[in-house]
Image: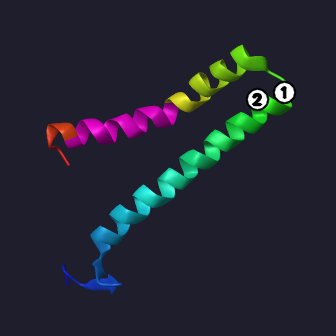
């Protein structure tokens, strides 16, 4: 039961791993679009737009860097 095939020859663990990477990447790109649109509609200017991307994008930057650190250290 542990190695049960789910779909397209993938196990549940493999499917979850691929889904997390693909869906989370799409979510990050969508959030970047939202931040950019918010900066444009609020007429924040160049300096304000930079600070909006830094402040609002800092959360997912931490999540992505956590994945890189895990790979480098071999924790994953």
* Left or right, 59 with reference to 50: left
Residue occupying image coordinates x 51% and y 28%: 58
Does 73 lie within the magenta span? no
* Left or right, 8 with reference to 40: left
Residue occupying image coordinates x 36% and y 35%: 65
Residue occupying image coordinates x 77% and y 34%: 38
- Say which quarter of the image contains residue 57: top right
* Residues at discs 1 and 2 in contact (Cβ within 8 Å): yes
Vertical position of residue 37 compared to residue 4: above or below: above
Residue occupying image coordinates x 27% and y 85%: 5
Q: Position of residue 31 (x, y in %)?
A: 63, 43
The stretch of residues the image draws in magenta is 59-71
Q: Which residue is mark 2?
A: 39
Most extreme residue toward the top, as rendered?
A: 47
Does 69 lie within the magenta span? yes
Q: Which residue is mark 1?
A: 42
Mark 2 lies on a secondary structure that is helix
Q: Position of residue 34 (x, y in %)?
A: 70, 41
Q: How is the image coloured?
A: rainbow
Tell me the distance, in whole angstroms, between the alpha carbons under discs 1 and 2. Answer: 5 Å
Could you tell me how many numbered marks the image carries? Answer: 2
Vertical position of residue 30 compared to residue 5: above or below: above
Q: Residues within 10 Å of mark 1 (few under 14, many from 20)?
A: few
Nearest to the observer: residue 39 or residue 2: 39
Q: Position of residue 62 (x, y in %)?
A: 42, 32
Mark 1 lies on a secondary structure that is loop
Q: Residues within 10 Å of mark 2 (few under 14, many from 20)?
A: some
Q: Position of residue 8 (x, y in %)?
A: 35, 84
Q: Main secondary structure of the magenta part?
A: helix
């Amino acid at each position: 039961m542990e190695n049960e095939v789910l779909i397209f020859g993938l196990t549940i663990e493999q499917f979850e791993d691929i889904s997390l990477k693909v869906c989370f990447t799409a979510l990050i790109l969508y959030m970047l679009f939202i931040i950019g649109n918010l900066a444009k509609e609020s007429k924040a200017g160049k300096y304000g737009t930079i600070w909006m991307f830094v402040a609002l994008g800092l959360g997912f930057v931490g999540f992505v860097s956590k994945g890189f650190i895990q790979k480098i250290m071999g924790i994953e």
